[in-house]
Amino acid sequence: MRDEMLYTNTSMLAFVGDAAYELCVRLRVSASGAFHSERLHRDATRYVRASAQASAIKAMLDGLPEEERRLVKRARNKRITTKPKNADPVDYKWATAFEALLGYYCLTEQSEKLEAAASAAMRIIDIDEAINREGGAAVISESADKSRNTGLGGGVTAIAAADARWGIGFEGGLLADLPGDRAYFRECTLNKTVVMGRKTLKSLPGGKPLPSRTNIVLSRNALFRADCEVFSSFDDCASRLESVDSSLVYIAGGAEIYALFLPYCDECLITKIDAVLPADSFFPNLDADGAFERVWESEPQSENGFTYRFTRYVRKDARAAGMGIGYE
Ligand SMILES: NC(=O)c1ccc[n+]([C@@H]2O[C@H](COP(=O)([O-])OP(=O)(O)OC[C@H]3O[C@@H](n4cnc5c(N)ncnc54)[C@H](OP(=O)(O)O)[C@@H]3O)[C@@H](O)[C@H]2O)c1
C-alpha cells in the first residue's frame, strides 16, 4: 500500500494533503485562543501560502527518506497546465509537492508523520518570518543533521506557564489556575510523549500520569510504576527518547527538569502570565538567553483575574539546522 502510494498520481495526493495540512493549521491556530474568525483566517493564511509551504518543504527535504524525497521531486516536476492565480509558479510547484507528501502520509495512515511534518513546516514558517522581520538572510541550510535525529538528538519542545519573573511553581503547585492554559497544554501534548520530574508527577491530580500521553518520569529512586516509565538518570532517559520522534517530545517540568533539558530544546511554548506571583521554582529566563528568540505571541487572554499570552520561543540556530522533523 505504502509503495503503491509513492507512485500514485501526485495531484490526487496533493488534493488530500492540502486538506490535511489545512486542518493541522486550523487546529494549531485555534489552539492559540478563541479569536474572531477573521483573525483565525489571517493567522492560518500565513501557513498555507504557496511561498511559505515552498520554503518549508525545501528546508525539510534533506531530512526525508530517499523514497519520500523522490515523491516530492516527482510532484514538484509535474507540469502545470494553468498559471496559478495568486502564487509564483515555482513556489506553487513546491507547495504542491509538500501537499503531495502530506497526502501520502494521510492515505498510508502515517498520522504521526503527518502531524510531525505539518508542525515542522509551521515552525519553519514562523522562523522564516521572524528572520525576515529582522532583515536577516532567509537562507535555509542544506544540512538537516538534526532533522534526522530522534529524541534528544534533535530539538524537543519545552512547555510551561511562567509569570513575569519566570516563576513556574510555589510550594509544589502551579502559580495560577488558568483553564485556557490547561486546554492549550492538553492540545499541544495529547498523544505525544511528556517528560517530567518526580515532583511534578506528584503535583498532578491523584499523583497520576497525564492520560492519553506517554509519561516519562525522572527520579533517582528507581520506583517501579505500571502507569508510567521511570528513569533514574538523564542518560537512561535520553536513550529512551532516542526511539521517539523529537517533534513529539514535550518537556513538561518542573524547574529541575526544564533546566536539565533546555540545552536540547529548540522550541519553548511559554504561557506568559502578566503578574509577579509568589514563586519558589523558576523556568530559565529565555529573554536573557541569547540562544532563544520570541517568534510569536498571542493576544492577551483574561481568566480568573489574570492576563496572559501564549508565546513561542525558538532557538536561533535551530533554523539553520533544519528544525528537525525526525523521520529516521
Ligand atoms: N508552570 C508550569 O508550567 C509548571 C510545569 C511543571 C511543574 N511546575 C511546578 O514546578 C514545581 C516542581 O519543580 P521542581 O524543580 O521542584 O521538581 P521537578 O523538576 O518536577 O522534579 C524534580 C525531581 O526530578 C528528579 N530528577 C531531577 N533530575 C534528575 C536526574 N538527573 N536524574 C534522575 N532524576 C532526576 C528528582 O526526583 P527524586 O527526588 O525522586 O530523585 C528530583 O527531585 C512544582 O511547583 C510544579 O507545580 C510548573
Image (cartoon, rainbow, N blue to C red):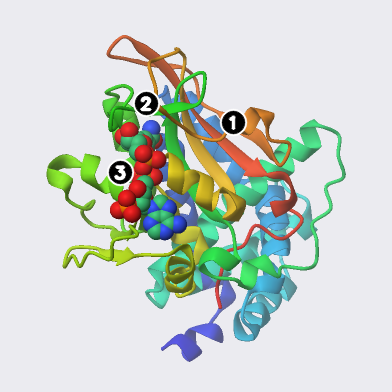
Label annotation for residue 191: none
Q: Estimate the x, y position of residue 220 in percent, counting from the top left.
A: 34, 60
**Quadrant in which the N terminus is drawn:** bottom left
Q: Estimate the x, y position of residue 95 in percent, counting from the top left.
A: 66, 59
Q: Quadrant of ligand 1?
A: top left
Could you give the CA–CA distance between mark 3 and mark 2, rounded to whole angstroms?
29 Å
Q: Nearer the viewer, residue 70 or 121?
A: 121
> Do the residues under discs 3 and 1 have CB atoms within 8 angstroms?
no
> Do the residues under discs 3 and 2 have CB atoms within 8 angstroms?
no
Q: Nearer the viewer, residue 18 or 61?
A: 61
Is residue 24 found left or right of 87 in the rendered image? left
Task: Please name the amino acid that badge 2 sits on.
Answer: Ala
| Residue 105 vertical position relative to residue 196 in the rendered view, above or below | below
Q: Is mark 3 within 8 Å of ligand 1?
A: yes
- Determine the residue located farthest toward the front in the rendered image: 221
Label annotation for residue 34: 2
Answer few, some or many: residues within 10 Å of disc 2's Cα (few below 14, many 20 plus, some between 14 and 19).
Answer: few
In this view of the protein, can residue 270 be seen by the observer? yes
Q: Earlier in the sequence, mark 2 or mark 1?
A: 2
At mark 3, the secondary structure is: helix
The residue at which mark 1 appears reads as 285
Q: Is mark 2 within 8 Å of ligand 1?
A: no
> Do the residues under discs 2 and 1 have CB atoms within 8 angstroms?
no
